[in-house]
Amino acid sequence: MSNHNSSPPKNKTANQSKVNLPYFDFLLSAFSAGNDALASSFGRHVHWGYWPDPKQATLTSEDFAQATESLSQQVCSAAFIHNGMTVLDVGCGFGGTIAHINENYTAMQLVGLNLDERQLQRACTTVNALPGNQIEFKQGNACALPFADNSFDVVLAVECIFHFPDREQFFKEAYRVLKPSGYLALSDFLPNTRRVPLMALKLPGWSFYGQCNLSCDIRAYHQLAAKTQFSVASERDITSNTLPTYSYLRRLALQQRVTMKRAALETLAIEALSRLNWVNYYILGLQK
């Protein structure tokens, strides 16, 4: 790995051609048009926020940016990240979690992986390695990681695993590339066990958030961990800490005069399910 940003490959792979994430299409178009409000909200992190005390949420753009930063920090804590580690962030988006680690730890070797070259291009231009750290952004498939066995101390998957075609295959790959006793840490929307049959229904192909598999509950995660030889080191339901996200998204949509019905309806559905305790937001830490 170099100590500067690497350039993603110029040629599209067969896997990349199948990327279908309309919400990233929307964001990238807005950034290109110079939309500073959306860039300040999602130009670094593209995930929900975490508020230690949700009642204190002010719902400003600065408040939301700090909350998304805090969510990355919570996932990193579940992996016991410390100085001198090699870390792989799978589904790295625009490189926000890599940037968070880069700014808070030293002597780090950091790799961000994504299937979508456009996201990597932004990451390469906005995330710069600080002295002593090394950063690489690489295009690749989460279910066929392009890395050697025992390469990383930590593998992260921040609010993206529901997009992967096969959670079990990703777990197998994460286990393979982790060093002995290494950690996999992730955040995911988990259905209440009694609601799994409902959540097994797939969102339509025109979904604003793309294809999302939200049918894996906490019991299934424990079974998956055992099957792939991971031990569950920690599990936290942080649903209540993420709920201000929905209020912020509504406020932002009104300010931006966003009239995308499918985006509004899908976000409202996720919020309703979360407030009903039918879907919960978890952070999991698993050890090899």
Image (spheres, rainbow, N blue to C red):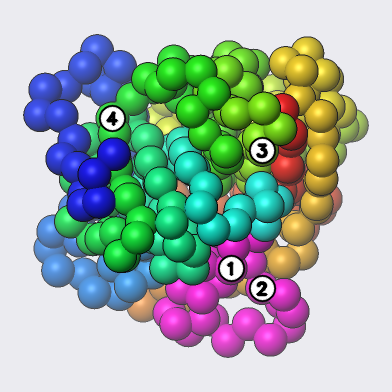
Graded by Cα atoms within 10 Å as few (under 14), some (14 to 19) or many (20 or more), the crowding at tag 1 reads: some
Quadrant of the snapshot with the C terminus: top right
Q: Is residue 30 magenta?
A: no
Front tag of 1 and 2: 1
Amino acid carrying label 4: it is Gln
Mark 4 and mark 3: Cα distance apart in space = 22 Å
Amino acid carrying label 1: it is Ser
Which residue in the structure is indicated by mark 1?
70
Q: Which residues are magenta?
A: 50-74
Which residue in the structure is indicated by mark 4?
139
Quadrant of the snapshot with the N terminus: top left
Q: Looking at the image, tell me whether mark 4 or mark 2 is earlier in sequence order.
A: 2
Corner quadrant of residue 46: bottom left
- Secondary structure under tag 2 reads loop
Which residue in the structure is indicated by mark 2?
51
Residue 58 on image: x %, y %? 58, 86
In the rendered structure, are the residues bearing label 1 and label 2 in contact, judged by CB atoms less than 8 Å apart? yes
Mark 1 and mark 4: Cα distance apart in space = 26 Å
Which residue in the structure is indicated by mark 3?
183
- Secondary structure under tag 4 reads strand
Compared to 187, does 82 lie above or below?
below
Residue 87 relative to residue 71: left or right: left
Amino acid carrying label 2: it is Trp
Residue at screen point 35% across, 60% down = 132
Residue at screen point 29% across, 59% down = 129
Mark 3 and mark 1: Cα distance apart in space = 19 Å
